[in-house]
Image (cartoon, rainbow, N blue to C red):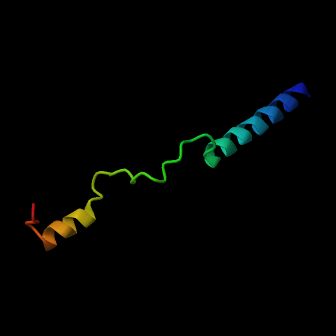
Amino acid sequence: MSFHIVLGLLFIAALALLALALSGYGSTDRSHEAPPRLPGHDVQDELKRRADPDPPA
């Protein structure tokens, strides 16, 4: 009987931690920053370079 109670409490604690992690509570607000540059995702820069290969300095 006590095993089921402990198992239930662990399950509830796991759900609470999962909800906390998914909510983003406590994380810093980075909405004002530019998104991170990921390798291979420079398509817009490549298109700009192809359209204007020698931009003015």
Figure label count: 0
In the rendered view, does 39 fall on the left or right side of 55? right
Q: Where, quadrant-wise, is the N terminus in this rendering?
A: top right
Q: Quadrant of residue 5?
A: top right
Instruction: Tell me residue 54's x, y (percent).
Output: 7, 66
Query: Which residue lies most toward the front here?
Result: 57
Q: Residue at x 68, y 38 (%)?
A: 17
Residue at the far right in the pictured view:
1
Point out residue 52 in the picture as x, y percentages from the top left corner: 12, 71
Query: Which residue does the image show at 37% across and 50% down from the upper left?
Result: 36
Task: Give the farthest residue toward the bottom.
Answer: 51
Q: Quadrant of the C terminus?
A: bottom left
Q: Is residue 45 above or below residue 38?
A: below
Residue 18 sits in quarter: top right
Q: Position of residue 51 (x, y in %)?
A: 15, 73
Vertically, is 32 above or below 56? Answer: above
**Vertical arrangement, residue 51 with respect to residue 11, above or below:** below
- Of residues 57 and 4, the one nearer the viewer is 57
Q: Residue 31 in the image: state x and y as whole percent.
A: 49, 53
Q: Give the camera-side residue of 22 and 35.
A: 35
Residue pictured at 14% horizontal, 70% vertical: 50
On screen, residue 4 above or below 40: above
Image quadrant in which you'd find residue 53 = bottom left
| Residue 6 shown left or right of residue 22 in the figure | right
Question: Which residue occupies the extreme left position in the image?
Answer: 54
Which of the pair 20/48 is nearer the observer? 48
